Image (cartoon, rainbow, N blue to C red):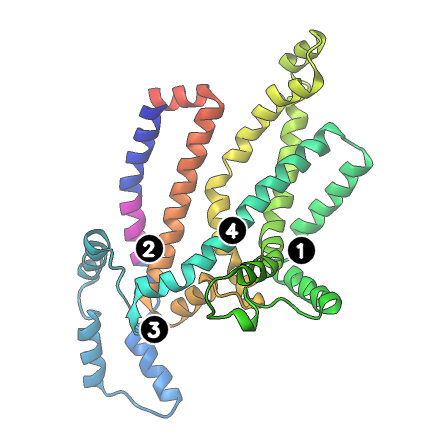
Amino acid sequence: MLRYITRRTLMMIPVLIIISMIVFWIIQLPPGDYVSTYARQLAEEGDQLSAADREALRQRFGLDLPIYQQYLNWIWGIVSRGDFGYSFAYARPVIDVVEQYMVMTIIVSVASFLFTYFVAIPIGVYSAIKQYSVGDYVFTTIGFLGMATPNFLLAIILMYFSFTWFGDPMLGLQSAEYRGADWSVGRVLDLLKHLIIPIVVIGTASTCELIRVMRGQMLDEMNKPNVITARAKGVKESRVIRKYPLRAALNPIVSTIGWSLTAIFTGSTITAIVLNLPTQGPVMLDAMLGQDMYLAGTWLLFMAVLTVIGTLISDILLGWLDPRIRDERTRS
């Protein structure tokens, strides 16, 4: 198993190098650069930026260099100094902007991720075991509604009910009296209270989809010969379910971690704007619209790294759950 994990980890290195090249190429695709966008914004406000000033800004930010040299300078700064570049819009190093929003982004993303899997798997198992029962129909209806409802609409509906019942729409992640205050028990409780709507909104679609996948996989596995044989031998039903159908049904669920991790991380963008969350979504959107290339590129790179890490976690869990997968991939 250790050899398998080491081999899969080393394979990540060339993948990440190629991804970093693609990310830098993508952020260079829009016409113009940050200086031209900045000059256009000044012109809309009635100010003008001379050609000499534009050229001086491009030389200051290194935007006059060939694209390959800009990429090499950027990637060397990341590898050698942990320097992700300079945010033109925030007039600060990118890493400072990322650190400001990363903690809350990770809290919301991890909480939504745990909510998705801890809710979806038990409900999927229940729906399969109690097929065509009242509970199965209820969860199936909720599942279809959850997949069909857009996140921003669900956010608005929950904010409406929160305001109607509690007098607070739960915008943001902190109440006004706790913003900027030192951490305390009261601030933590206030954060947990404000996390409920974002977690439900971000995690609902993925949860409902995984419920359907888990239910389908369990139903496929529950009538296989090994399960029928175990029942014929008098093995307790709960043990049969846990040992055979559940373990086999978890394989496709685990394989979804790779893309689910990134989907939850990036899927919070629209929800964050609607709920006024201090997370990476609005920051990344503004960076891409304003051609703040190093900030936008850093967020895109983080998403790509999350996808690679999620895929690695999926492969390790699949190898642990099913040794045949580990042996086949090691031989190949």
157 w.r.t. 224: above or below: below
Give the vertical position of 215 relative to 76 (above or below).
above
- How far apart are the alpha carbons under marks 3 and 2? 21 Å
Of the two numbered discs 1 and 2 on the same chain, state the one appearing first in sequence.
2
Q: Is residue 303 above or below residue 99?
A: above
Give residue 152's quadrant in the image: bottom right
Give residue 23's mark.
Answer: 2
Q: Earlier in the sequence, mark 1 or mark 4?
A: 1
Q: Which of marks 4 and 2 is nearer the N terminus?
A: 2
Q: Which residue lies furthest to the right in this view?
A: 134
Residue furthest to the front in view is: 185
Q: Which amino acid is tagged 3? A: Tyr
Query: Of helix, strand and loop, which mostly describes the magenta segment?
Result: helix
Query: What distance separates the C-alpha of mark 4 from that of mark 2?
Result: 20 Å
Q: Is mark 2 on a helix, strand or loop?
A: helix
Q: Is residue 50 left or right of residue 260?
A: left
Q: Is residue 185 left or right of residue 304?
A: right
Which residue is identified by label 3? 90
Residue drawn where x is 71% and y is 70% of the image: 167
Q: How crowded is mark 3: few (under 14 residues within 10 Å), some or many (20 or more)?
A: few
Q: Residues within 10 Å of mark 2 (few under 14, many from 20)?
A: some
Residue at the spot of label 1: 149
Does the stretch in magenta take in 17? yes
Residue at the disc numbered 4? 264
The label shown at residue 309 is: none
- Which residues make up the magenta segment? 16-24
Decide which of 194, 220 is in the foreground and name it: 194
Q: How many labels does the image show?
A: 4
